Amino acid sequence: MDIRLFLKNAEGENHAKKQKKYNDHPYDIANFLDKDNISLEERHILLKKIYIPPLNFQYPQTLCANRKLKFQNSYFTRWLWLAHSIRNSGAYCKICVLFGPRYAGINLVKLNTLVKTPFNKYKDAGEIFDNHQKTNYHKSCELMISSKESIQKGDMIPISAIIDKNRIKIAKENRGKIKLTIEAILYCGLQGLALRGHRDSGSLNFNNNDNEGNFRGLLKFKALGDPVLMESLISTNKNATYLSPRNQNEIIDICNNIILEKLIVEINSAPCFSILADETTDIAGIEQMSLCARYVDTHKNIIKEMFLQFIPVSSMTGSALADIIFVNLKKLKLNINMIRGQGYDGARAMIQFNGLQAFIKKKCPAIYFHCAAHSLNLAISDSCSLPLISNCLGKISSIYEMFRYPKRQNILNRIISETPGPTRRKNCKKLVQQDGVFDIKQ
């Protein structure tokens, strides 16, 4: 076969594969021509996600007045509302597709070109695009979008709120209450306090001194100096109290996502990082893996070890643990190619040739290190069998048992406080010998 023909065929196959990839894009404007099952809020989100082909994309040519013409990338900068559907091979107005009516005009003519059907006759494209953006239905769609953005920024008040002024007042009160709830949850989180126990349901009761948990106790304390807040918290006629465990968990999840986003940015900015993992069973009997990352903070030039997530696990084999770690690292958007170290305890599922560390090494050059805390614990456990260390620990235990009683503690504290530094040790020895429990050898 001629080499030129071979290269041409290969290039054609590659182009076909790329075109198929582009055709399957989930945010192609042609996927949203039927917007009846899409909420208004979802349309505003989709407007920013509509797919725009890359600069090197080869647009299909169409025959117009004996000329082969095609869509130009420059159209996107001149008409910002334009979108090109690769699946339908034509241009659309993404604003009118998502927000426009089915019919327009005095006689309610059905909208087709640029709204329901693709535009691909590019001979007079500029004139047709200019005329489209001057139409009333297109302008009304633009006004709807700009009003939504102004409301979100706080520059404009919604019409419903203008009509019902009481709604503004209720919204302000609800924001104040949820702000108080968030502050109480953040305080409990910073102090490591449990939010609730088994007496945390219903409205707050200010007429008794029952312990209703840290979260509800903080709210009651805050409301003691604010009669308006107290009335809003104890009122049973208002739905928005934000005290339920479900609301607490939602706020905790939001805080977790915000913290994780900041941690992920910090970790990904480091040249590399290590992963640390250990498993434990919680009070509910669920086996959980604690996943941590060790990295260098490039801004402060310090090494950090940060906890990322608790991950429920059902299998404790090395391959299963490795899969769980990689899946969750990808969810967290951490670059697994930057892993250079891994640290676990000495369990067989972790360190054997078919353990977790071996499966991690197959995908990234991560050196395994035995956990320093576990190593220290094993070293102390083994050293306790030596007579010298065993006797030393026995003496320490006996001294602790002797001075555990308040009377002896008071005598010891008095002698230590009255004795100057150089002779303090001799007087303590004398005190122990006089008690007769045991003698301290020189």
Image: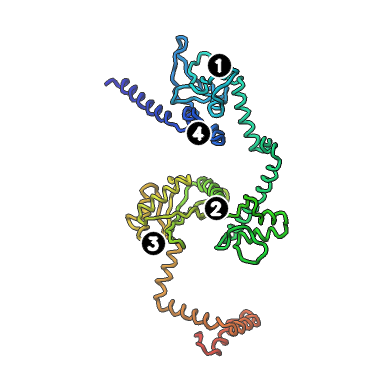
Which of these two is toward me, 8 or 291? Answer: 291
**3 vs 2, front mark:** 2
- The amino acid at mark 2 is Arg
Spatial CA span between label 1 and label 3 = 72 Å
> Residue 115 location in percent, x, y?
52, 23
Would you identify the image quadrant in which residue 184 lies? Answer: bottom right
Image mark count: 4
Residue at the far left: name it: 1
Element class at badge 4: loop
**1 vs 4, front mark:** 4
How crowded pointer 4 is (Cα within 10 Å; few <14, some 14-19, many 20+) is rated as few
Q: Earlier in the sequence, mark 1 or mark 3?
A: 1
> Residue 240 location in percent, x, y?
63, 50
Spatial CA span between label 3 and label 4 = 55 Å
Q: Residue at x 71, y 40 (%)?
A: 165
Q: Earlier in the sequence, mark 3 or mark 4?
A: 4
Q: Which residue is mark 1?
A: 128
Q: Which residue is mark 3?
A: 346
Would you identify the image quadrant in which residue 281 lies? Answer: bottom left
Q: Which residue is mark 4?
A: 37
Q: Earlier in the sequence, mark 3 or mark 2?
A: 2
Q: Earlier in the sequence, mark 4 or mark 2?
A: 4
Q: Which residue is mark 2?
A: 246
